[in-house]
Image (tube, rainbow, N blue to C red):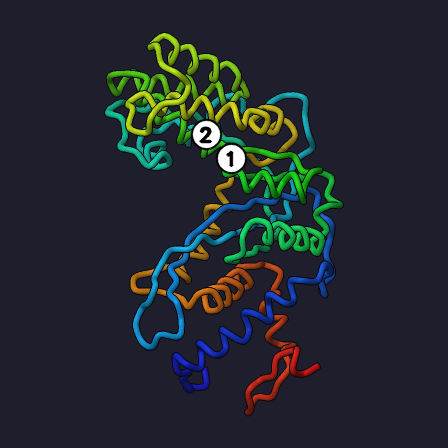
Amino acid sequence: MLGNGLSAKSIERLVNQVGPELADRLQGEHSDQQVVAPEVAVVSCDGGRIHTREPGHGPGVHAACWRETKNALFERMTAPQAGSTDPCPELPDTFRQVAHVAKIAEKAPFDADSPPPRPVRYEGPKRILRTCLSSLVNSEQFGPQMHREAQRRRFYEAERQVFLGDGLPWNWSIQRDYFPTFIPILDFIHAVQYLYSAAQAWETDDARRWSRYLELAEAVWQGRVGQVIAQLRAELAARGLPERLPDDSPHEPLATAARYLENNRERMDYSRYRREGLPITSAPMESLIKQVNHRVKGTEMTWNAPAGAEAILQLRSASLCEDGRLDDYLRRRLGCPITRRPTLGSAA
């Protein structure tokens, strides 16, 4: 707006100042804003990746590696009153289209026809506001960060509390330790990935594979997970195979799907979740990771580890929060317009 530019070094300096300051502010359990306890509180978490280098070696990329990021989403939502009947007992069209399901599963699509479309869609809760976190710390350190954010957003006071995740063990460790009152729900989309792969290994032609997938997905959607596990185990037994197979075995997806469903079956009562008006997919979490990656991942984009990478993750996640926390902080940040701003620590 003023026609003045900033050098790359100036931007780097500001990022390395503001990022740690934002992280320090997140150590508190109370928000400066007026916060309303949500009707439905939904917490999700998942991993991402960022490319880092070792600093202090001059120009160029030294000791480059990919490091896992931890990301968390906090959604304040509203939902209809819980009912006694499932509002969407049939598998929605989203999961009945060959090309779309293959994309979800990251597999080649079966050479089969999708069934005729039908106006079936689950209208879950509606989001009012989201906040998020992103960091390089491990899950033992990220759990307390998530706990503090949930306290700031008054999530523990919500009428309905949900924790959504995929099958990664660290997700459920955080849920057990910091969100024990939240209903744990396995993301249905991740279940679809395993069912599609299992159907591919189960049958010998694409038409039958697609039919098998639809049968399995419909059963899981309706909460009949035990039935699907029994079918998978029966098929393995009929082939004279154990429930653990080498990764290169063509039958391995059957065994993997059976284990995955067994490990998560207590988080897969999807019919009940829909009756209670709860979300059953982590699509918003996947979307958040893409938004974080849009800024921190790219061709020839490498960050100093750990300080530079952590600083940009703090800034990016703050900018994606819908409570205006980044703008509020920058407006109140100590300093002078013609000199370098001091940190809160030096000001004190």
Left or right of 302? Residue 76 is right
User: Which residue in the structure is indicated by mark 2?
Assistant: 191
Question: What residue appears at the point 40 percent right and 28 percent down from the top-left corner?
Answer: 194
Question: What residue appears at the point 51 percent right and 36 percent down from the top-left corner?
Answer: 281
Q: Is residue 137 above or below residue 198?
A: below
Q: Nearer the viewer, residue 221 or 97?
A: 221
Q: Is mark 2 on a helix, strand or loop?
A: helix
The residue lying furthest to the right in this view is 157
Q: What element carries label 1?
A: loop
Left or right of 261? Residue 57 is left
Look at the image and tell me in which quarter the N terminus lies. Answer: bottom left
The amino acid on which the numbered mark 1 sits, given as a three-letter code, is Asp
User: Which residue in the structure is indicated by mark 1?
Assistant: 187
The amino acid on which the numbered mark 2 sits, given as a three-letter code, is Ala
Q: Where is residue 142 in the image (x, y as percent from the top left)?
A: 59, 52
Contact between labelled residues 1 and 2, with CB atoms less than 8 Å apart? yes
